[in-house]
Image (cartoon, rainbow, N blue to C red):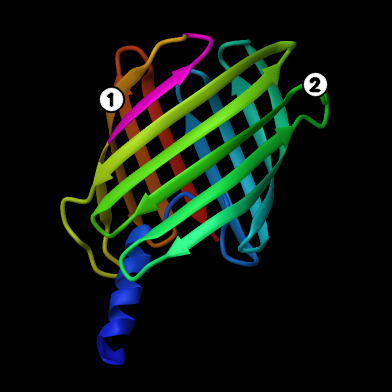
Amino acid sequence: MGIKYLVPFIVGLLSSIIDARPVSYPGGITVMGFSDNMKDSIYVHYSPTHYYSLGLETKKDKYSDSDYSYLRFTYLLNRKNTQHSQRNFYFQSGVSPDKASNHFIGFHGDWETRRLYAGFSYKNAKVSSQSYSDRFVQLGIAPYLGEYGDIHTWIMMKAKKNTLDNDWSVYPMLKLFKGDFLLEVGYNNKTKLDAHLMYRF
């Protein structure tokens, strides 16, 4: 592949796989908002390098009916780029500055091309002396391949489970992003609204 074809291809690939990743480019600041049947939260993180991020998450826990915050640390354990895809694997952790017994550790991973997406997350948390785990898997496909600067669309299926409900919930998700802005939204009768907003500075 000649250089005049390689550069547009790389730009197109990166424009389609820039995702809501927990580590940004060096010096980048990211603001995220989450809402589902378990929580409402706002998470802001700063990435000194592309290997790790430091952040603060404020959270309204709907299950325990409590409000608390986490000081968060995320580290990129592994990344593999190929001509057509990228794979990422992260370690995630958080601890409450007010109550150290409130904490979590977990892992997040994704693999994607311009057309296909697969991702997962696993988190083990302790809140108010109660321990639980939360996990999900996501699969998606892009119905069209947008160019740099276009609105990119993913149609996805998400399956998630936590040990508090102890039952899998499966539902469709729609993901839209353009430039530094991303929106993910899904719904079913059990989990209700599952929404995620992100803006990267």
Label 1 packing within 10 angstroms: few (<14), some (14-19), many (20+): some
Residue 135 percent coordinates (x, y): 48, 26
Label 2 packing within 10 angstroms: few (<14), some (14-19), many (20+): some
Residue pointed to by mark 2: 101
Mark 2 or mark 1: whose residue is earlier in sequence: 2
Residue pointed to by mark 1: 171
Taking the view exactly as shown, the residue that stands out farthest to the left is 143
CA–CA distance between discs 2 and 1? Answer: 33 Å
Asked if residue 33 is positioned above or below residue 6 in the image, the reply reads above
Residue nearer the viewer, 88 or 102: 88
Which residue corresponds to the image point at 27% horizontal and 38% vertical from the top-left?
156
Residue nearer the viewer, 21 or 110: 110
45 displayed left or right of 198: right
| Residue 164 inside the magenta-drawn segment | yes
85 displayed left or right of 34: left
Per the rendered image, the range of residues in magenta is 157-165
Asked if residue 141 is positioned above or below residue 134 in the image, the reply reads below
Which residue corresponds to the image point at 25% horizontal and 85% vertical from the top-left?
1
